[in-house]
Image: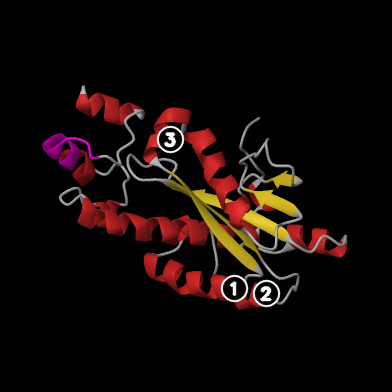
Amino acid sequence: MGRKIDPDLIPAQPNLNFENAFWQAGIQRVGGIDEAGRGALAGPVVAAVVILPPQPGVRHSLVGVRDSKVMTPNQREKWRAKIQAQALAWSVGFASPREIDAYGIVPATRLAAQRALDKLSPPPEHLLLDYLQLPNTPTPQTWLVKGDARSLSIAAASVLAKTIRDEHLRGMEETYPGFGFASHKGYGTKAHRQAIQRLGPSPIHRMSFAPMKLMVS
């Protein structure tokens, strides 16, 4: 199954069309899920779930929320606080670098999402996901291509996952100095790769990833 979508189906900003359809059908707690850190060389993968209140007006309250990848760090931090204040419920879950190495990145991402769901109260009645599928989760799910650009709930989850993971990696700068985690957040920048070659891998590097194998071999 490909991940292509007609560009005309992608709105100018994420909206509540999918959520509204469920709200009108009597399904009030619709949780959007997204993750951050799948492609990094170091650090955890973090998944967030956000349940927005079943009120169309919440779109205006969160009008600046987008897919986190197209927002600046300052924008993400600003809207993180507003998402947390507006949400009916929200939660995040982590999967560690060792779990990523042991299970693979997709199973580890599912594990992080399940941990977020396990902490969420009240629980969602339906899930909207950015293409990720959770086969072991009994909650009904809808998988959307470019979900973080189409669903406000998923976009809000992407902002929380990104900002909370970034916060975690900034903390790793003190634990493992010299790698520059506060700037690159574990992604494979030139400076990060040079630091790995100079210092060797840290305990939070993902040794199963191909670039890491090449650098330490």
Labelled disc at residue 171: none
Residue 193 x %, y %: 21, 39
Residue drawn at (28%, 52%), measured in percent from left and top?
184
Question: Which residues are drawn in magenta?
Answer: 195-202
Circle 2 or circle 3, nearest the eye: 3
Task: State the quadrant of the N terminus.
Answer: top right
**Label 3 belongs to which residue?**
100
Relative horizontal placement of residue 21, taking residue 47 as reference (left or right)? right
Cα–Cα span, label 3 and label 1: 33 Å
- Specify whether residue 198 is painted magenta: yes
Residue 106 x %, y %: 52, 35
Residue 145 x %, y %: 64, 44
Is label 2 in a helix, a strand or a loop? Answer: helix
Cα–Cα span, label 1 and label 2: 6 Å
Residue 30, image quadrant:
bottom right
**Label 1 belongs to which residue?**
62
Residue 178 x %, y %: 15, 50
**Badge 1, how many Cα within 10 Å: few under 14, some, many 20+?**
some
Circle 3 or circle 1, nearest the eye: 3
Cα–Cα span, label 2 and label 3: 35 Å
Mark 1 and 2 residues: CB-CB less than 8 Å, in contact? Answer: yes
Amino acid marked by disc 1: Leu
Residue drawn at (43%, 70%), measured in percent from left and top?
77
